[in-house]
Image (cartoon, rainbow, N blue to C red):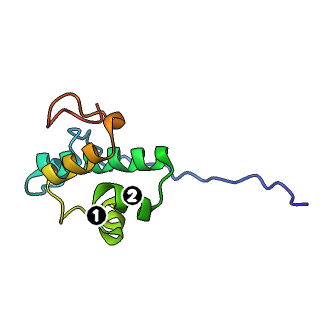
Amino acid sequence: MRAKVKAMTTHKSRTNDEKVERGSGDVFADLGFKDPEERLLKARLATKIAQLIEKKGWTQTQTAERTRLDQPKVSHLLRGRLSGFSADRLFAILNRLGPAAGTSGGSHARLGE
């Protein structure tokens, strides 16, 4: 029998010289990345794809078969390594996941909002 252990948390108090800024909602723009809108769109698409794969309970191999990707590319996609994927390619993958993928709002519908 395992004893329950209450987790202890400690909080450091903030000093008055720390500056906190509210973000714009686009972390890529806030950090000064090139093409922040494209990066944000790709991140949202990858998140939607990962959510659908999890909802369907598919393995990476099953996902690869259904999306016409190889398993290593599915792994890259699910880990957020999106440099090898264009937004159009991610939309195509999303569409291959089926009509429940939620892309009826046009090819570049706003995601995650």
Q: Position of residue 40 (x, y in %)?
A: 20, 47
Dot 2 corresponds to which residue?
63
Q: Residue at x 36, y 66 (%)?
A: 75
Q: Within 10 Å of the Cα at label 1, are there few (<14), some (14-19), or many (20+) other Cα atoms?
A: some
Q: Residue at x 30, y 55 (%)?
A: 67
Give the secondary structure at mark 1.
Answer: loop
Give the secondary structure at mark 2.
Answer: helix
Question: Is residue 59 visible from the viewing direction of this image?
Answer: yes
Task: Report the side of 86 relative to 104 (left or right).
Answer: left
- Residue type at mark 2 is Thr
Q: Nearer the viewer, residue 73 or 32?
A: 73
Dot 1 corresponds to which residue?
69
In the rendered image, the residue lying farthest to the top is 105
Q: Position of residue 98 (x, y in %)?
A: 33, 40
Quarter where residue 108 is shown: top left
Q: Residue at x 15, y 31 (%)?
A: 106
- Residue type at mark 1 is Leu
In the rendered image, the residue lying farthest to the left is 34
Which dot marks residue 49? none
Task: Report the side of 23 relative to 2 (left or right).
Answer: left
Q: Residue at x 31, y 61 (%)?
A: 77
Q: Nearer the viewer, residue 29 or 103?
A: 103
Name the quarter where the C terminus is drawn.
top left
Residue 35 drawn above or below residue 102: below
Question: Is residue 44 visible from the viewing direction of this image?
Answer: no
Q: Nearer the viewer, residue 97 or 22?
A: 97
Mark 1 vs 2: CB contact within 8 A: yes
Q: Position of residue 1 (x, y in %)?
A: 91, 60
